[in-house]
Amino acid sequence: MTVRLRLPRRALAAATAGALALSLAACGGTTKDSAEASGDKAGSGKTANPNAPMEKGLKLAFLPKQVNNPYMKIVDDSGIAAAKGFEAEAKEVGPSDASASSQVSYINTLIQQQHDAIMISANDPNAVCGPLKQAMQQDIAIVAYDSDTAPECRDVFIKQASSEDIARTQVEMLAEQIDGKGKFAILSATANATNQNAWIELMKKELEKPEYAEMELVKVAYGDDDDQKSFQQTQGLLQAYPDLKGIIAPTTVGIAAAARYIDGSEYKGKVAVTGLGTPNQMRQFIKNETVEEFALWDPKQLGYLAAYAGGALASGQITGKEGEVLKAGDLGERTIQPNGEIVLGPPTKFNAENIDEYRF
């Protein structure tokens, strides 16, 4: 990961003028352009200023996988509200579909609009890299959240919880619900989603443990984070595997669609559905016993943390280097982990006993 020393955007004009004067007076000295041409990374080895104030009037933008995703809406609305708390302007923009390249044009527009920070939940880790690197070259802070980009294409990644905890929790929940025996399927989002693929691979690893020897993963299906397609994929799974005992959907769109299909079918009470969902969307399925238990982190806190990371990067308080400390308002401090990751916290399990305690 490239570590860059970021000046507050509103100081760039003065800094640029000063740098121009120095370069004219010191012929033969090393400039940023000449350093980059020789292969040096701009800003490498420089440190953040944790005592720098949060700059006021910053322009932040949230770019979700798709704007009509209820979960993404919760995350982004919370981030926008958090930005107001440190006197920044924030908005949500994005595509209505979750295809790999659908976010590219929005990144280009945000660059043209000279935003200070872009928070992105990537549909594809590599498809967005080109324009994101262009944004970084123009001193725009890049915060990946929920679904990561390739590490070289952002400053930090706001991770919902450790991937190991997320994967382990989902396998544990299903095992409890099907008594550790039988065939099951995974209903994922898009085939290229970074977070989904990481969790699925770790779930497969978790299944190698002796206690899961009688559980068999028969299929990984993709609903593309589309409600109707996820509903149809659930139907298709049960047609192909009539003896299926359970479905894990590590996506809020997928779990709600799967639960809706099971609720209106002969499989209710016979096929367990679990995974990641929000209490508000899953409440009815918990109440009518279609779903026994599912998990998630607090999406409001995820958006809040992403907003503060964007503001701190744009203000020069952090650069994304391992060991730096992000001061995140009401959430307290988070130490930046290897590879620029900032972890929100462990997932929470929701069931009939506690779901009414949560409203998101």
Image (cartoon, rainbow, N blue to C red):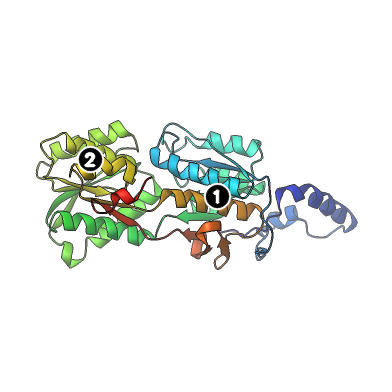
Residue depicted at x 65% and y 64%:
50
Furthest toward the front, the residue is 357
Under mark 1, the amino acid is Ala
Apparent side of residue 4 relative to residue 230 in the rendered image (left or right): right
Q: Is residue 17 visible?
A: yes
Residue at point 16%, 65% (across, down): 211
**Could you say where residue 29 lies in the image, as x and y percent from the top left?**
82, 60
Residue under label 2: 259
Residue toward you, 103 or 146: 146
Up-down relation of residue 251 to residue 160 (above or below) = above
Viewer can see residue 119: no
For marks 1 and 2, give the CA distance.
32 Å
- Amino acid on which disc 2 is placed: Ala
Q: In this orientation, which residue lies closer to the viewer: 339 or 254?
A: 254
Mark 1 and mark 2 lie on one chain; the one further toward the N terminus is 2
Label 2: which secondary element = helix
SS under mark 1:
helix
Q: State whether residue 56 is above or below residue 238.
A: below
In the drawing, does residue 2 fall left or right of residue 334?
Answer: right
Name the mark on residue 307. Answer: 1
Q: Quadrant of residue 164?
A: bottom left
